[in-house]
Image: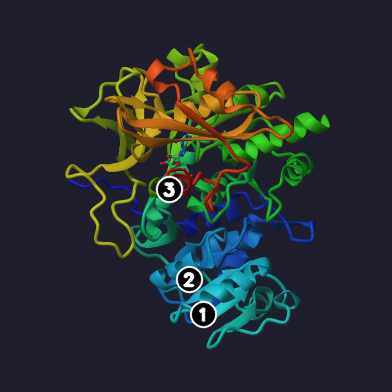
Amino acid sequence: MLGLMQRRELLISSIIVHAARHHGEAGVISRRKNGALVGASYADIELRARKLMGVLRDLGVQFGDRVATLAMNSDRHLELYYAISGMGAICHTINPRLSVDDIGYILDHAEDGVLFVDPGFLPLAKGAAVRTPSLRAIVVLGEEAEIGTCNPPHGKAVYAYETLMSQAAAAPDWPEFDENTASGLCYTSGTTGRPKGVLYSHRSSLLHAFGVCMPDGIGLRATDRVLPVVPMFHVNAWGLPYAAPMVGATLLMPGRQLDPVSVLRLMNEERADLAVGVPTVWSALLAHVRATGARFDTLKRIMSGGAALPLALVEGFEKFGVEAMQGWGMTETSPLVTANRPKPATVDAPADHACKQGRVLFGSDLRIMGAEGESPWDGKTPGEVSCRGHWIASGYFRHQDNILTRDGWLPTGDVGVIDRDGFLKLTDRTKDLIKSGGEWISSIELENIAASHPDVAEAAAIAVPDAIWGERPLVIVVPREGRAPTPEAIRTFFEGKVAKYAVPDRVAITDALPHGATGKLLKTELRRIYLAPKA
Ligand code: ADP
């Protein structure tokens, strides 16, 4: 027997319709390139997104087509999110920090027909577009003047967004279709090979947004003013463009100004309650506030993800009355799977409990797999973190590879332990473990210890082949400005902090570590530099 309840498809458009109807006064404040702040209510965004559907149709976009964006966080990017997905096309966000070559590959692989770009990314777009036969048009997110003296790439049209919008008639309503329809596409860089596309659906995005809003998710409400420093090209800015309008929270969009001075100014001028981003952003912001004597006028919480949140940051923010918390996930998981929010048993846990990645939210599930099967939740037996759920990928776009285990779980390449309260603590990644004399050494642990040395700004640990031990750790550090630690001082700093076998034999000092487009350490590059056979 079936229930007698109404069935409505879980469509992304329903979020902006709700926001316009019930939170029309809330909306988005965006920093433009010239520094000006512009406001748009959710009612404005909904109306303009319906106009944009008209623009997309005029540009020949049809149901199921991929439409690319190369843009920072702004109201216009939000309009694109809703209009493209809302008409049944696929909003394909591309990371502008990637190389022209990778962007060209991604555009071509996805067969994008139209590309929307921030004016500053136009040269990049043009460079990448020449390799993309499917691409018909580039639309510059601004006024006609912002196209500049652009020679369109051969066979492609270039338009100004606001000109097209001024000529378009708003679609009268939002189309209805199957909630399993693809809505978004985001490519993620692997350790090897070309980037692979994760293809989100309306249903997965909507359910993930519910999870983000839950009090023990990121936790959003109508009175919140949220600053996503995490870009909209990176896993849909962790779902905030859907979650904030869902509850009527206001979004503060920083545009390209992601330096600590600009981020703090936007926070204080626009009274942010919550900001979301990676640890690198938070450490730069904290250093700026400490150095200048500035303060956080209204900020109550920051949410960190993408990399481990060091205790020093949690404690640093606490001194300014700001709670720092972290979540864990990846592009393949939409991303939020865990958030570190207390349970009754952990309310009085020691401070370093904040360094755990957190516990799973309803909607996905987590397990850690050791050599013997699922590892016990004892806080000490590690295993590869695997997940499954409503917003976890089942495969990559146009890839044959089966990425799930036979019983339907996604192995993540992260290694961790789960404690008896269900809190995940990452200890390593499968590719980054160092095995010495049969014992595992955590490269992350070595990096965290090195980074806590007062003279060290950043550290990386890699495995070096060793005739006796199989592998030994090499720790590479970048000194803080004005400091000159010796390798021996760093090496002895490990003594007593890790097992004897884990104390690195070698420490190298360098000026800078190589980072990828999303700020992650490029260990492959470090291996190339430090493990190259000597001539
Ligand atoms: P994102 O950086 O948005 O989480 P990516 O797919 O680029 O998405 O990277 C996912 C990887 O980042 C995870 O597999 C994990 O290795 C790392 N990561 C994400 N969140 C955390 C966290 N809170 N602590 C440590 N590592 C994390």
User: In the image, is residue 19 above or below residue 157?
Assistant: above
Mark 3 closeness class: few <14, some 14–19, many ≥20 residues within 10 Å? few
Q: Is residue 244 left or right of residue 88?
A: right
**Residue type pointed to by label 1:** Val
**Earlier residue among tags 3 and 1:** 1
User: Label 3, on which residue?
Assistant: 532
For marks 3 and 1, give the CA distance.
36 Å
User: In the image, is residue 258 above or below residue 422?
Assistant: below
Closest to the observer: 192 or 274?
192
**SS state under label 2:** helix
User: Label 1, on which residue?
Assistant: 130
Q: Residue furthest front?
A: 535
For marks 2 and 3, give the CA distance.
30 Å
**Earlier residue among tags 2 and 3:** 2
Q: Residue furthest right?
A: 293
The answer to whether the residue labelled 2 contacts the one labelled 1, judged by CB atoms less than 8 Å apart, is yes
**SS state under label 1:** loop
Q: Which mark is residue 474?
A: none
Q: Position of residue 173 (x, y in %)?
A: 51, 68
For marks 2 and 1, give the CA distance.
8 Å
Q: Which mark is residue 104?
A: 2
The answer to whether the residue labelled 3 contacts the one labelled 1, judged by CB atoms less than 8 Å apart, is no
Is residue 322 visible in the rendered image? The answer is yes
| Quarter of image, res 268 | top right
Q: Position of residue 407 (x, y in %)?
A: 18, 42
**SS state under label 3:** loop
Is label 3 or label 1 in front?
3
